Image: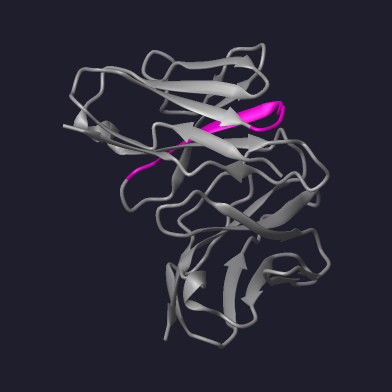
Amino acid sequence: DAKTTQPPSMDCAEGRAANLPCNHSTISGNEYVYWYRQIHSQGPQYIIHGLKNNETNEMASLIITEDRKSSTLILPHATLRDTAVYYCIVRRQTSYDKVIFGPGTSLSVIP
Amino acid sequence: SAVISQKPSRDICQRGTSLTIQCQVDSQVTMMFWYRQQPGQSLTLIATANQGSEATYESGFVIDKFPISRPNLTFSTLTVSNMSPEDSSIYLCSVAPGQAKNIQYFGAGTRLSVL
């Protein structure tokens, strides 16, 4: 499995965009970038994923660089409820490819 | 999507005893996974459990310590055997329904404290 590198922690002002970076320089051509988050005392929650095109859903946007070696998760208007640990994971889009977690980024949204 | 129920949600156990954690899913799934999250740490995969076959354990985890059952496509159990305080963790069940996006869903976890 390709490995990812994320900053251990970040702060973001409430109402501002939160931009969470992830480096995955060894990603393979058939591996997707998945983002999950874990709010305190809950199980991880899927946010978004993509292969090479930028993606957007109701929760966030995912920007993947053209060389696919890095990506950024964007929470457009962060709220206090977005305070969580965010995990960037690379894996194939198949049920046989389990999710392997790194340390993630602890995002604190500040009032 | 998939809704996962884990029981118990938390427990306090004495060292040397065993605890069986149950995971129930609201739909049939092929792949089920068990994770451990030690205090202040990220999640670590213990094993993958497929119905009808033996569980596949990750490096550092053995069947004698963490036996897993998978009797059908909606249910699995993880037993933490001969517990010590080092086993105090959150244990999470996860499933991959195998739909197009291949999203893996997680239960809320079982918070285990061993005295």
Which quarter of the rendering shows the N terminus of chain A? Answer: top right
Residue at x-position 37% and y-position 51%: B41
A47 sits to left or right of A83: right
Q: Position of residue B42 (x, y in %)?
A: 43, 50
Residue at x-position 80% and y-position 40%: B99
Q: Which residues are magenta?
A: B26-38
Residue B70 to residue A5: above or below = above
Q: Name which quarter of the figure residue A34 lies in.
A: bottom right
Q: Position of residue B19 (x, y in %)?
A: 33, 21
Judging from the image, the colouring scheme is: one colour
A64 sits to left or right of B40: right
Nearer to me, A26 or A100: A100
Residue B109 to residue A38: above or below = above
Q: Position of residue A108 (x, y in %)?
A: 43, 75
Q: Name which quarter of the figure residue A77 lies in.
A: bottom right
Residue A13 to residue B52: above or below = below
